[in-house]
């Protein structure tokens, strides 16, 4: 993966990936995330979902993500000002310092059967919306959280015949 400066056309860096299938920039273009098919080598060296400094090509952190989904891409989502970064996990979301993602998890959102999430556009206060689809006779659930209080949603809506395709800000 080669990163170029759009205004000059000059190459900023080359990311040492062996077979990236997807790449995406953070909102300001400061970071690039790439996804490669998971191998034992990638798993042991930080993961196949990797975050890079877009200016220098420095590897910042990685996560193991077995399968790829176009609907969920990009997996790491930053707030518009890149203060927080979020990654969906099983039944929840891990939040990171968006400017120093390698330091680890700073907060969590928990929600059973979570299928998708979204961060509100704009700067603070940050809102995170989650969606869990209906299961059998249980309705779908959307919750709205306000960072930094991520234990109690500020709003909850239950509904039938809903899909995350209708899940827009």
Image (cartoon, rainbow, N blue to C red):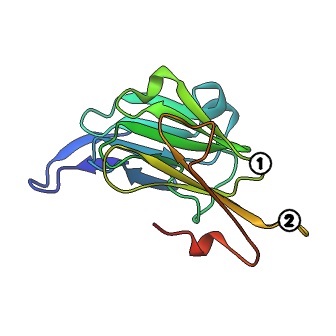
Q: Residue at x 50, y 69 (%)?
A: 168
Q: Is residue 164 left or right of residue 121?
A: right
Q: Residues within 10 Å of mark 1 (few under 14, many from 20)?
A: few
In terms of depth relative to the viewer, which is nearer, 159 or 25? Answer: 159
Q: Secondary structure at mark 1?
A: loop
Q: Please say if 82 is above or below 133.
A: above
- Residue farthest left in this picture: 8
Q: CA distance from mark 2 to mark 1?
A: 12 Å
In terms of depth relative to the viewer, which is nearer, 39 or 53? Answer: 53
Q: Secondary structure at mark 2?
A: loop
Residue 49 seen in the current view: yes
Residue 133 seen in the current view: no
Does label 2 or label 1 sit earlier along the sequence? 1
Q: Which residue is mark 2?
A: 138
Tag nearer the camera, 2 or 1: 2
In terms of depth relative to the viewer, which is nearer, 142 or 2? Answer: 142
Q: Residues within 10 Å of mark 2 (few under 14, many from 20)?
A: few
Q: Is residue 2 left or right of residue 24?
A: left
- Residue farthest top in this picture: 103
Q: Residue at x 34, y 41 (%)?
A: 82
Q: Which residue is mark 1?
A: 112
Q: Residue at x 77, y 53 (%)?
A: 113
């Amino acid at each position: 993966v080669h990163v170029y400066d759009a205004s000059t056309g000059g190459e900023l860096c080359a990311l040492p990936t062996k077979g990236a299938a997807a790449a995406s920039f953070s909102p300001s273009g400061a970071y690039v995330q790439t996804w490669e098919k998971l191998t034992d080598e990638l798993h042991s060296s930080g993961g196949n979902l990797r975050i890079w400094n877009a200016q220098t090509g420095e590897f910042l952190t990685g996560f193991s993500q077995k399968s790829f989904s176009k609907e969920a891409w990009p997996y790491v989502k930053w707030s518009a000002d890149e203060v927080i970064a979020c990654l969906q996990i099983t039944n929840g979301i891990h939040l990171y310092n968006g400017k120093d993602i390698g330091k680890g998890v700073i907060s969590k959102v928990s929600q059973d059967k979570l299928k998708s999430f979204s961060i509100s556009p704009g700067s603070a206060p940050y809102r995170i919306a989650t969606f869990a689809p209906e299961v059998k006779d249980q309705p779908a659930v959307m919750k709205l959280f306000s960072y930094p209080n991520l234990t109690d949603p500020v709003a909850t809506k239950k509904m039938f015949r809903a899909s995350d395709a209708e899940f827009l800000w």
